[in-house]
Image (tube, grey):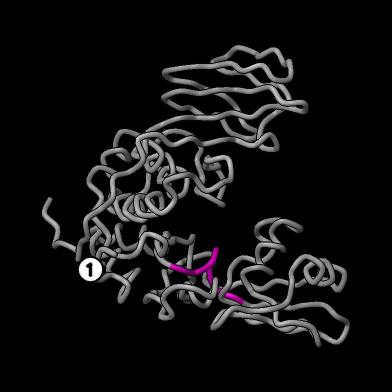
Amino acid sequence: MNHPPLPSQVQAPLPSRVRVEWPRQRLPARLAVNGRALSHRAGRIYRFHGVVRFRTETTLVVLRGSVAARAQDHGWTVSWTTSGEGWVAAAVAGELGDQEPFEARRALASVLRLWLQAHPKGHHPNGSLCPLTHCAVVRGMGSKETATAVVQSPDLAIRPEYAFFTGSKGGVSLSPCEVWGDGPAEPGPSELVPGDRWAAWTRHFRPEQVQVLKRSVRPGLRIRQRGLMLGPSGPYAVEALRLAAGRAFGWTAWPSNACEAELTQDGSLDLKGHGWGHNVGLDLTEATWRARRGDHAEAILQVAFGEWMKPVQAD
Protein backbone atom coordinates (compact mmCIF):
# COMPACT_ATOMS: atom_id res chain seq x y z
CA MET A 1 0.00 0.00 0.00
CA ASN A 2 1.43 3.37 -1.01
CA HIS A 3 1.02 6.40 1.21
CA PRO A 4 2.01 10.02 0.62
CA PRO A 5 5.19 10.83 2.55
CA LEU A 6 5.24 12.94 5.67
CA PRO A 7 7.85 15.61 6.37
CA SER A 8 10.61 13.49 7.86
CA GLN A 9 13.68 13.68 10.00
CA VAL A 10 16.48 11.24 10.76
CA GLN A 11 14.99 9.07 13.44
CA ALA A 12 17.16 7.95 16.34
CA PRO A 13 17.20 4.18 16.79
CA LEU A 14 14.95 2.74 19.45
CA PRO A 15 16.61 1.35 22.59
CA SER A 16 17.67 -2.25 22.16
CA ARG A 17 16.42 -3.08 25.66
CA VAL A 18 13.40 -1.70 27.48
CA ARG A 19 12.39 -2.76 30.98
CA VAL A 20 8.75 -2.59 32.07
CA GLU A 21 8.12 -2.99 35.78
CA TRP A 22 4.74 -3.85 37.31
CA PRO A 23 4.58 -2.18 40.74
CA ARG A 24 3.71 -4.17 43.82
CA GLN A 25 0.35 -2.39 44.13
CA ARG A 26 -0.75 -3.83 40.75
CA LEU A 27 0.03 -7.46 41.54
CA PRO A 28 -1.72 -10.01 43.75
CA ALA A 29 -0.16 -11.06 47.03
CA ARG A 30 0.07 -14.60 45.63
CA LEU A 31 1.66 -14.80 42.21
CA ALA A 32 1.49 -17.62 39.69
CA VAL A 33 3.60 -17.67 36.53
CA ASN A 34 2.97 -20.17 33.74
CA GLY A 35 0.50 -21.92 36.01
CA ARG A 36 3.01 -22.35 38.82
CA ALA A 37 2.43 -20.72 42.20
CA LEU A 38 5.59 -18.95 43.32
CA SER A 39 6.82 -19.38 46.88
CA HIS A 40 7.14 -16.00 48.57
CA ARG A 41 10.41 -15.28 50.38
CA ALA A 42 11.46 -11.62 50.44
CA GLY A 43 14.38 -10.98 48.10
CA ARG A 44 13.98 -14.16 46.05
CA ILE A 45 13.95 -13.70 42.28
CA TYR A 46 12.37 -16.05 39.75
CA ARG A 47 13.48 -15.71 36.12
CA PHE A 48 11.56 -16.87 33.06
CA HIS A 49 12.27 -16.78 29.33
CA GLY A 50 10.17 -17.28 26.22
CA VAL A 51 6.39 -17.03 26.53
CA VAL A 52 5.48 -16.05 30.09
CA ARG A 53 1.97 -15.76 31.57
CA PHE A 54 1.05 -14.15 34.87
CA ARG A 55 -2.02 -12.50 36.36
CA THR A 56 -2.36 -8.95 37.60
CA GLU A 57 -5.32 -7.93 39.74
CA THR A 58 -7.69 -8.17 36.79
CA THR A 59 -5.86 -9.43 33.72
CA LEU A 60 -3.88 -12.38 32.43
CA VAL A 61 -0.68 -10.91 30.99
CA VAL A 62 1.12 -12.84 28.24
CA LEU A 63 4.66 -11.72 27.41
CA ARG A 64 7.51 -12.93 25.27
CA GLY A 65 11.08 -12.28 26.36
CA SER A 66 12.78 -12.17 29.75
CA VAL A 67 10.66 -11.84 32.89
CA ALA A 68 11.82 -11.56 36.49
CA ALA A 69 9.48 -11.86 39.48
CA ARG A 70 10.93 -10.50 42.72
CA ALA A 71 9.40 -11.20 46.13
CA GLN A 72 9.11 -8.01 48.19
CA ASP A 73 8.36 -7.61 51.87
CA HIS A 74 4.70 -7.17 51.01
CA GLY A 75 4.00 -8.71 47.63
CA TRP A 76 5.79 -8.88 44.29
CA THR A 77 7.23 -6.84 41.46
CA VAL A 78 7.50 -8.18 37.92
CA SER A 79 9.96 -6.89 35.31
CA TRP A 80 9.78 -7.57 31.59
CA THR A 81 12.78 -6.93 29.35
CA THR A 82 12.03 -6.53 25.66
CA SER A 83 13.19 -4.58 22.63
CA GLY A 84 12.10 -1.05 21.82
CA GLU A 85 9.91 -2.38 19.02
CA GLY A 86 8.43 -4.96 21.40
CA TRP A 87 7.50 -2.26 23.89
CA VAL A 88 5.89 -0.07 21.20
CA ALA A 89 3.78 -3.00 19.99
CA ALA A 90 2.71 -3.82 23.55
CA ALA A 91 1.84 -0.17 24.23
CA VAL A 92 -0.17 0.14 21.00
CA ALA A 93 -2.11 -2.98 22.00
CA GLY A 94 -2.60 -1.67 25.54
CA GLU A 95 -3.63 1.88 24.67
CA LEU A 96 -5.61 1.21 21.49
CA GLY A 97 -6.16 -2.53 21.10
CA ASP A 98 -5.09 -5.26 18.71
CA GLN A 99 -8.52 -5.27 17.07
CA GLU A 100 -8.64 -1.61 16.06
CA PRO A 101 -7.96 -0.58 12.45
CA PHE A 102 -4.44 -1.20 11.22
CA GLU A 103 -3.93 2.42 10.13
CA ALA A 104 -4.88 3.72 13.58
CA ARG A 105 -2.29 1.37 15.08
CA ARG A 106 0.32 2.62 12.60
CA ALA A 107 -0.41 6.20 13.67
CA LEU A 108 -0.13 5.47 17.39
CA ALA A 109 3.05 3.46 16.81
CA SER A 110 4.63 6.53 15.21
CA VAL A 111 3.87 8.62 18.29
CA LEU A 112 5.06 5.96 20.73
CA ARG A 113 8.30 5.46 18.83
CA LEU A 114 9.09 9.15 19.22
CA TRP A 115 8.04 9.16 22.88
CA LEU A 116 10.40 6.27 23.58
CA GLN A 117 13.24 8.09 21.83
CA ALA A 118 12.65 10.99 24.23
CA HIS A 119 12.95 8.58 27.20
CA PRO A 120 15.91 6.33 26.29
CA LYS A 121 16.75 5.77 29.96
CA GLY A 122 13.20 5.05 31.06
CA HIS A 123 10.59 7.27 32.64
CA HIS A 124 11.19 6.32 36.29
CA PRO A 125 14.26 6.95 38.48
CA ASN A 126 15.27 3.28 38.34
CA GLY A 127 15.44 3.32 34.53
CA SER A 128 12.19 1.44 33.96
CA LEU A 129 8.86 2.12 32.33
CA CYS A 130 5.60 1.21 34.06
CA PRO A 131 2.59 -0.47 32.41
CA LEU A 132 0.31 2.41 33.47
CA THR A 133 -0.78 5.66 31.84
CA HIS A 134 2.22 7.44 33.39
CA CYS A 135 4.25 5.74 30.63
CA ALA A 136 1.84 3.72 28.49
CA VAL A 137 -0.64 0.97 29.26
CA VAL A 138 0.80 -2.52 28.77
CA ARG A 139 -1.45 -5.56 29.19
CA GLY A 140 0.74 -8.00 27.29
CA MET A 141 2.69 -8.25 24.07
CA GLY A 142 1.07 -6.99 20.90
CA SER A 143 -0.21 -9.29 18.15
CA LYS A 144 1.82 -10.08 15.04
CA GLU A 145 -0.30 -7.62 13.07
CA THR A 146 0.35 -4.90 15.63
CA ALA A 147 4.08 -5.66 15.45
CA THR A 148 3.81 -5.20 11.68
CA ALA A 149 2.08 -1.85 12.24
CA VAL A 150 5.08 -0.78 14.31
CA VAL A 151 7.54 -1.77 11.58
CA GLN A 152 5.45 0.05 8.97
CA SER A 153 4.72 3.16 11.06
CA PRO A 154 5.72 6.42 9.34
CA ASP A 155 8.40 8.76 10.61
CA LEU A 156 6.84 11.71 12.38
CA ALA A 157 8.65 15.04 12.10
CA ILE A 158 7.91 16.61 15.44
CA ARG A 159 10.16 16.97 18.45
CA PRO A 160 10.16 13.68 20.40
CA GLU A 161 9.21 15.44 23.63
CA TYR A 162 5.98 16.61 21.94
CA ALA A 163 4.84 13.10 21.00
CA PHE A 164 1.59 13.07 22.97
CA PHE A 165 -1.64 11.13 22.55
CA THR A 166 -4.94 11.19 24.40
CA GLY A 167 -8.00 8.97 24.62
CA SER A 168 -10.43 11.53 23.22
CA LYS A 169 -10.49 15.28 22.69
CA GLY A 170 -14.24 15.43 22.45
CA GLY A 171 -13.77 17.90 19.62
CA VAL A 172 -11.64 20.29 21.74
CA SER A 173 -7.88 20.25 21.18
CA LEU A 174 -5.35 21.79 23.58
CA SER A 175 -1.69 22.66 23.10
CA PRO A 176 1.20 21.39 25.26
CA CYS A 177 1.69 24.96 26.46
CA GLU A 178 -1.89 25.16 27.71
CA VAL A 179 -1.60 21.88 29.60
CA TRP A 180 2.00 21.86 30.88
CA GLY A 181 3.20 25.41 30.29
CA ASP A 182 5.84 24.32 27.79
CA GLY A 183 6.04 23.41 24.11
CA PRO A 184 3.97 24.53 21.12
CA ALA A 185 1.38 27.17 21.94
CA GLU A 186 -0.94 26.21 19.09
CA PRO A 187 -3.23 23.18 19.48
CA GLY A 188 -3.62 20.75 16.63
CA PRO A 189 -7.00 20.59 14.87
CA SER A 190 -9.66 18.24 16.16
CA GLU A 191 -12.96 16.94 14.85
CA LEU A 192 -15.86 15.75 16.97
CA VAL A 193 -16.38 12.04 16.41
CA PRO A 194 -20.03 10.93 16.04
CA GLY A 195 -21.07 8.85 19.02
CA ASP A 196 -17.99 9.71 21.13
CA ARG A 197 -18.98 8.95 24.72
CA TRP A 198 -16.58 11.67 25.92
CA ALA A 199 -17.92 14.39 23.61
CA ALA A 200 -19.40 16.18 26.62
CA TRP A 201 -19.40 15.40 30.31
CA THR A 202 -20.34 16.99 33.67
CA ARG A 203 -18.99 16.36 37.15
CA HIS A 204 -19.80 17.57 40.66
CA PHE A 205 -17.34 17.73 43.56
CA ARG A 206 -18.60 18.13 47.09
CA PRO A 207 -17.06 20.84 49.31
CA GLU A 208 -14.95 18.32 51.21
CA GLN A 209 -13.63 16.94 47.90
CA VAL A 210 -12.69 20.46 46.78
CA GLN A 211 -10.72 20.85 49.98
CA VAL A 212 -8.85 17.62 49.22
CA LEU A 213 -7.87 19.02 45.81
CA LYS A 214 -6.74 22.33 47.31
CA ARG A 215 -4.55 20.50 49.82
CA SER A 216 -3.10 18.28 47.08
CA VAL A 217 -2.18 20.95 44.50
CA ARG A 218 -0.03 24.02 44.93
CA PRO A 219 -1.39 27.21 43.36
CA GLY A 220 0.60 28.79 40.56
CA LEU A 221 0.85 28.54 36.79
CA ARG A 222 3.53 28.52 34.15
CA ILE A 223 3.25 30.96 31.26
CA ARG A 224 0.10 30.30 29.16
CA GLN A 225 -0.86 27.27 31.26
CA ARG A 226 -4.59 26.75 31.82
CA GLY A 227 -5.70 27.29 35.39
CA LEU A 228 -8.75 27.54 37.63
CA MET A 229 -9.54 29.65 40.65
CA LEU A 230 -11.14 27.80 43.55
CA GLY A 231 -12.82 30.67 45.32
CA PRO A 232 -10.24 33.23 46.47
CA SER A 233 -7.35 30.77 46.15
CA GLY A 234 -5.42 29.85 43.05
CA PRO A 235 -4.99 29.75 40.19
CA TYR A 236 -4.41 26.00 40.14
CA ALA A 237 -3.16 24.20 37.01
CA VAL A 238 -6.03 22.23 35.49
CA GLU A 239 -3.66 19.34 34.70
CA ALA A 240 -2.59 19.13 38.34
CA LEU A 241 -6.19 19.24 39.57
CA ARG A 242 -7.24 16.52 37.10
CA LEU A 243 -4.43 14.21 38.21
CA ALA A 244 -5.07 14.90 41.90
CA ALA A 245 -8.77 14.13 41.41
CA GLY A 246 -7.87 10.89 39.65
CA ARG A 247 -5.58 9.76 42.44
CA ALA A 248 -8.06 10.70 45.17
CA PHE A 249 -11.43 9.82 43.64
CA GLY A 250 -10.80 7.56 40.63
CA TRP A 251 -9.67 8.25 37.08
CA THR A 252 -13.12 9.12 35.75
CA ALA A 253 -13.66 11.76 38.44
CA TRP A 254 -12.21 14.58 36.29
CA PRO A 255 -12.10 13.22 32.74
CA SER A 256 -10.15 15.86 30.79
CA ASN A 257 -8.38 19.23 30.74
CA ALA A 258 -10.82 20.88 28.31
CA CYS A 259 -13.32 22.05 30.89
CA GLU A 260 -15.03 24.97 32.58
CA ALA A 261 -15.62 25.18 36.32
CA GLU A 262 -18.02 26.96 38.65
CA LEU A 263 -17.52 27.10 42.39
CA THR A 264 -20.93 27.33 44.06
CA GLN A 265 -21.82 29.22 47.23
CA ASP A 266 -21.63 26.11 49.38
CA GLY A 267 -18.05 25.42 48.22
CA SER A 268 -18.84 22.61 45.80
CA LEU A 269 -17.44 22.55 42.26
CA ASP A 270 -19.37 21.94 39.04
CA LEU A 271 -17.47 21.00 35.89
CA LYS A 272 -18.44 20.82 32.22
CA GLY A 273 -15.95 19.44 29.75
CA HIS A 274 -15.00 17.58 26.62
CA GLY A 275 -12.73 14.63 26.06
CA TRP A 276 -10.84 11.98 28.01
CA GLY A 277 -7.25 12.69 29.01
CA HIS A 278 -5.15 15.79 28.51
CA ASN A 279 -6.56 16.68 25.03
CA VAL A 280 -3.12 17.04 23.40
CA GLY A 281 -1.68 15.38 20.29
CA LEU A 282 -3.10 12.26 18.66
CA ASP A 283 -6.74 11.64 19.54
CA LEU A 284 -7.16 7.86 19.66
CA THR A 285 -10.95 8.04 19.26
CA GLU A 286 -10.59 10.26 16.19
CA ALA A 287 -7.72 8.16 14.81
CA THR A 288 -9.85 5.02 15.02
CA TRP A 289 -12.83 6.78 13.40
CA ARG A 290 -10.70 8.16 10.57
CA ALA A 291 -9.07 4.78 9.96
CA ARG A 292 -12.49 3.14 9.71
CA ARG A 293 -13.42 5.74 7.09
CA GLY A 294 -10.37 4.73 5.07
CA ASP A 295 -7.77 7.32 6.12
CA HIS A 296 -4.20 6.10 6.34
CA ALA A 297 -1.84 6.81 9.22
CA GLU A 298 -0.07 9.62 7.40
CA ALA A 299 -3.32 11.58 7.01
CA ILE A 300 -4.34 10.84 10.60
CA LEU A 301 -1.04 12.19 11.91
CA GLN A 302 -1.23 15.25 9.68
CA VAL A 303 -4.61 16.12 11.17
CA ALA A 304 -3.50 15.45 14.74
CA PHE A 305 -0.29 17.49 14.75
CA GLY A 306 -0.92 20.10 12.08
CA GLU A 307 1.63 22.89 12.32
CA TRP A 308 3.91 20.89 14.60
CA MET A 309 4.68 18.54 11.72
CA LYS A 310 7.66 20.25 10.12
CA PRO A 311 11.21 19.09 9.36
CA VAL A 312 13.19 19.20 12.57
CA GLN A 313 16.77 20.42 12.22
CA ALA A 314 19.50 18.61 14.07
CA ASP A 315 20.93 20.61 16.97
Viewer-closest of 314 and 210: 314
- The image quarter in which residue 303 lies: bottom left
Name the spot of residue 117 as percent of width and height, x first: 37, 50
Q: Over which residues does the magenta segment extend?
A: 273-280
Name the spot of residue 256 as percent of width and height, x first: 58, 68
Q: Residue at x 14, y 58 (%)?
A: 3
Count numbered badges in the picture: 1
Image quadrant in which the C terminus is located: bottom left
User: Image check: 82 left or right of 59?
Assistant: left
Assign the magenta stretch its main secondary structure: loop
Name the spot of residue 235 as percent of width and height, x first: 70, 82
Q: Residue at x 48, y 75 (%)?
A: 174
User: In the displayed structure, would residue 129 be above or below residue 290?
Assistant: above
- Report if residue 275 lies within the magenta region: yes
Mark 1 closeness class: few <14, some 14–19, many ≥20 residues within 10 Å: some
Viewer-closest of 152 and 105: 152
